[in-house]
Amino acid sequence: MSGKDKLRKFRENESFKCLHQPKTEEVLGKDYCMKGKWATNVFNNNNPITLELGCGKGEYTIALAKMYPNRNFIGIDIKGARLWKGAKEATELNMPNVAFIRTRIEFIESLFDKDEIDQIWITFADPQIKRERKRLTGPMFLNRYKNFLKPEGIINLKTDSRFLYEYTLACAQQNNLSILKGDTDIYSNPDIDPILTIKTFYEAHYLKKGLPITYLAYKIDNTQPLKFPEWDEQYWEEEEIKSHGYVPANKG
Ligand SMILES: C[S@@+](CC[C@H](N)C(=O)[O-])C[C@H]1O[C@@H](n2cnc3c(N)ncnc32)[C@H](O)[C@@H]1O
């Protein structure tokens, strides 16, 4: 994408009502003005809210919102040129149950209040092989999500990365979290849940390479601060290099 193209998208982003772009000073160390008010001020209803973290172009957010018109969906990503695609589609289709936020997920506690969120989807996140503290399913982030996800709330992880899948499973087991579903090759199941067949930009890329797609659903139903897992990081790193043919760091 040329720089000119990016600038055009950034300009157009300013016109999308569904796209919220908080400035750093609005979320750094303080509550964003919409915290606790997404249902009433943005969606104008009390329907449950699902987040997609690292949503990229927003394929899951948009597809889920079409499947479940009585639920609300918010996609979060830092990359404006990617969010442009989802925000444009939601605007053109006049979808009242979709919003996007351009921000760093590190600020997430400034955005949502206690029990404000029903579910989280994490789709094809960077496994952050060398940076455990940056993993979106690691305890650093789970301890943040606990502050706004309902106690019965579910986290859905869909990924090409067996490394991230196994790490997340180990983290859930280490912390005695309830695991609802785990599947290391979703498309091998003839009775696959239609919700799992939504394909993102990155998923299409990994399917072309013939990689199995994994899925894990679990709850953060432990009130204690969550701990880092003990697991065989070295083994799964080597497996990841073999399966992907490269170290899949910094996917973008
Ligand atoms: C590998 S892409 C996956 C995008 C999309 N979910 C898909 O499957 O096509 C990871 C996305 O997460 C976003 N991301 C990674 N870390 C982030 C962070 N800390 N805050 C906000 N966005 C982040 C990136 O900008 C990128 O769009």
Image (cartoon, rainbow, N blue to C red):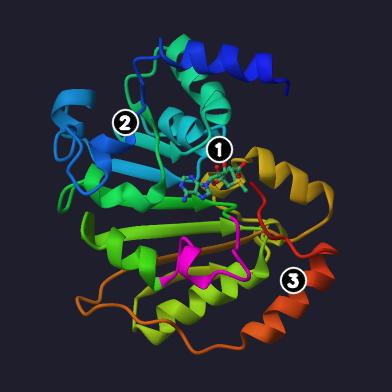
In the image, 180: left or right of 97? right
Q: Going from the N terminus, do you reach mark 1 or mark 3 first? A: 1
Q: Residues within 10 Å of mark 2 (few under 14, many from 20)?
A: some
Amino acid at pointer 2: Pro
Q: Going from the N terminus, do you reach mark 3 or mark 2 first? A: 2
- Give the SS element for disc 3: helix
Q: Which mark is residue 76?
A: none
Q: Is residue 15 above or below residue 22?
A: above
Point 80% across, 63% down: residue: 244
Task: Return the x and y of residue 53 as percentages of the image width and height.
Answer: 44, 47
- CA separation, marks 1 and 3? 22 Å
Query: CB under 8 Å between callouts 2 and 1?
Result: no
Q: Quadrant of residue 225?
A: bottom left
- CA separation, marks 3 and 2? 36 Å
Q: Quadrant of residue 141?
A: bottom left
- Give the SS element for disc 1: loop
Residue 128 in the magenta stretch? The answer is yes
Which quarter of the image is occupied by the N terminus? top right
Q: Which residues are magenta?
A: 126-138
Specify whether residue 79 is in view. yes
Which residue was labeled with disc 2?
Answer: 22
Q: Going from the N terminus, do you reach mark 2 or mark 1 first? A: 2
Which residue was labeled with disc 3?
Answer: 240
Point 49% across, 63% down: residue: 134
Q: Quadrant of residue 137?
A: bottom left
Amino acid at pointer 3: Glu
Task: Return the x and y of residue 74 as percentages of the image width and height.
Answer: 36, 36
